[in-house]
Image (spheres, grey):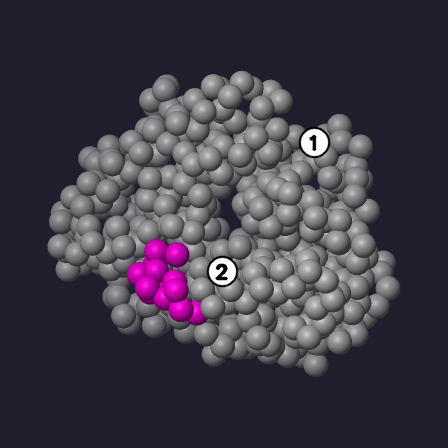
Amino acid sequence: MVKQKKIVFHSIDSPRRELEWRIFIAVKLAEKGFTNVIGSKTEIEYLHEFSRNCFFLGRLNSVTGRYKSDLEYLKRMEQNGTKLFYLHDEGGFYFRGEYDDAVKKIYPNELFNSKSFDKIFFWGERQKSVFEDHAEKSKFVVTGSPRFDLLKPCFRHIDIENVEKLRKRYGSFVLVCTRFGAVNRVPDEPTTLSKRSYDIRAEGGALKKYSQAQVLETMFGAWEKISYEFTSFVPSLAKLVQDFPDVNFVIRPHPAERQSFYTESFSHFENVIVEKSGDVRPYIRAAEVVIHSECTTGIEAEIAGKPTINFRPCMNMPKYEGFSVEGVCDVGSLCNSYESLKISLERALSRQLDRESALSNAGPYLDNCNEFEFSFNKVVNAIESARSSNSVASYFPVFKVRSFLQLKRLLKNRFRAIRDSFFTIKMQRSGDSKFYRFDDDAITDFVDRLESNGVKVQRKGRNIWITPL
């Protein structure tokens, strides 16, 4: 067993999107004396079973936090003396026509009165305002999202080496970030029209406000809009790469998208590379221009000081207005036709793209858009100020199974380890899985580049431990 003053669990859903900023936060906490354990949802849930008086930073296992297993997890947190600092990895940008409902879907507000909920972190004031009359609002803190801190100029140094490698590999390039998981979903994610997607809305309280027919209409409407964008975006991109034969294009699929679709579809073009490995941040910094379609990477690129083109085929179409992504739809140079896309790219490559007030509409949804506003300080300070007894956890609790439930969790954990190691290798290599493993050297190098003041990083089993020296 490991006994420390304070131990923080970090549960990861999508490694490409989350791991590096989780390591960043863990390093900042380790500098304050905290021991940190970073791992998959299954791994952290299993280690948590044998813990006492620990901290948990993140969300519960399902996207809504209301699934039956989530409620059991929360009950165990209460029993184990865990302090939960609720920070949702998807906490910022949603369709305009259902924004409040979408926020309520991912924040299980009926559980906020649990003694384990110590603080609820919001990306922006807009999300917090959805619960302005909540009885537990004293637990609310607007922090922003630490992931976006790393795009700011003061952290440019952490990507210098990777940026140089990318430019050496691809030359001067345009980064194209897609977000069409609704019609190009990886197999390990529920599809947009699946029963699980419907259940997620139901768990979020949709059926208390709308009929089943209305919920399904919204689901199919969202799918229709994204399908329209997809079938416009892909052919337009194919035409664009032919009209700019001397420009390299790196296509970066969303973590929930199948990379193989783009690899196959753009195999005809020598100036196109499809790449989904690692975090998107170094790619943004290495690119000349970023093209997206109402994607969060547009926000990241603007924070990093890169010109962005927001290609929105559905823009100005009343039928789809309610499905515009609030907080992102106005970020970047807006285009809705191939002709305007081509002109915007020409202007961007010649440094003539207007970038004034690019992030002005994102501020209410992401508190740390501003260059001088940092999320990590607020998160770390909130955790540091919490009172608790000494924490207890275990590196490898495999020999401590004392009940059928614990045995069940152990077997589930081991099965997923085997599956990730063997059965999904092909999907991982093709980019057709949300799962991704950063190698140990890459993790150590990233910690070194953060220039921390005395922390130690180790991989123990499938988890990463970041501790004070």
Rendered location of residue 321, percent (x, y): 41, 24
Q: Find out whether residue 428 is within the magenta segment.
A: yes
Q: Nearer the viewer, residue 416 or 185?
A: 416
Image-quadrant location for residue 275:
bottom left
Q: Does the rendering let one see residue 150?
A: no
Q: Which residue is painted at 62% across and 22% down in the image?
A: 208
Q: Does the rendering let one see residue 200?
A: yes
Q: Nearer the viewer, residue 71 or 291?
A: 71
Rendered location of residue 255, percent (x, y): 41, 53
Q: Are marks 2 and 1 in contact (CB under 8 Å)?
A: no
Q: Which residue is painted at 24% across and 42% down in the image?
A: 234
Q: Which residue is painted at 33% across and 68% down in the image?
A: 166
Q: Find out whether residue 380 is within the magenta segment.
A: no
Horizontal side of residue 127 vs 298, given as left or right: right
Q: Which mark is residue 435?
A: none
Rendered location of residue 136, percent (x, y): 79, 37
Tell us which disc is closer to us: 2 or 1.
2
Q: Which mark is residue 131?
A: 1
Report the predominant secondary structure element of the magenta stretch.
helix
Q: Which residues are magenta?
A: 421-433
Rendered location of residue 320, percent (x, y): 38, 24
Tell me the quarter of the image containing the N terminus: bottom right
SS assignment at label 2: helix
